[in-house]
Amino acid sequence: MQNYTAATIEGYVTHDPVMRTTKTGKNICMFSVAINHFSNPDASPRVSFIDIETWEKTADLCAKSVTKGKHVLVAGSLRQDRWEGKDGKTQSKLKLVGNQVRFLDPSREVKAQGGGAH
């Protein structure tokens, strides 16, 4: 049985996107989003940095429209990548595979929507 995961985050892009193409010719666009967490008015905010991966049509639009500092809302599913590090230990990273990206900057309201993880 397959489980269902869904996540939506809103934050600011931390670096310009990186676009690449798989061996099978599919485009992937990757960037990171900073999310501020507020616990109470007197506390300093905590910040989380979430890696975003988009595919195909969504990746194409993100590669053209996403820039560092842009305010975005990303919806998709969570995925954990695992690999063996140079030290032989298992490493892992959780990321959001975005299939919808909404640009929240008031000057340009654009919505990217496309395929999910491949």
Image: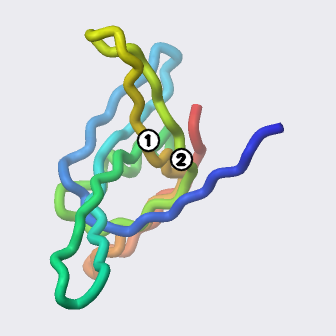
The residue shown at (71%, 50%) is 4
Q: Hey, which residue is sitting farthest right in the picture? A: 1
Q: Secondary structure at mark 1?
A: strand
17 relative to 7 in the view: left or right:
left
Chain-order first, disc 2 or disc 1: 2
Crowd class of label 2 (few under 14; some 14 to 19; many from 20; radius 10 Å): some
8 relative to 41 in the view: left or right:
right
x and y percent of residue 109 in the render?
A: 37, 74
The residue shown at (36%, 16%) is 89
Crowd class of label 1 (few under 14; some 14 to 19; many from 20; radius 10 Å): few
Asked where in the image residue 65 lies, by quadrant, the reply is bottom left
Q: Nearer the viewer, residue 5 or 27?
A: 5
Q: Amino acid at mark 1?
A: Leu
x and y percent of residue 57 in the render?
A: 50, 44
The residue shown at (49%, 39%) is 55
Q: Amino acid at mark 2?
A: Leu
Asked where in the image residue 116 lies, by quadrant, the reply is top right
Q: Hey, which residue is sitting farthest bottom in the picture? A: 41
Which quarter of the rendering shows the N terminus? top right
x and y percent of residue 43 in the render?
A: 19, 81
Judging by the rendered image, the residue that carries numbered circle 2 is 78
Judging by the rendered image, the residue that carries numbered circle 1 is 94
User: Does the CB distance between marks 2 and 1 fall below 8 Å?
Assistant: yes
Which quarter of the rendering shows the C terminus? top right
Count of picture labels: 2
The residue shown at (23%, 67%) is 46
Q: CA distance from mark 2 to mark 1?
A: 7 Å
Q: Secondary structure at mark 2?
A: strand
The image's colouring method is rainbow
39 relative to 58 in the view: left or right:
left
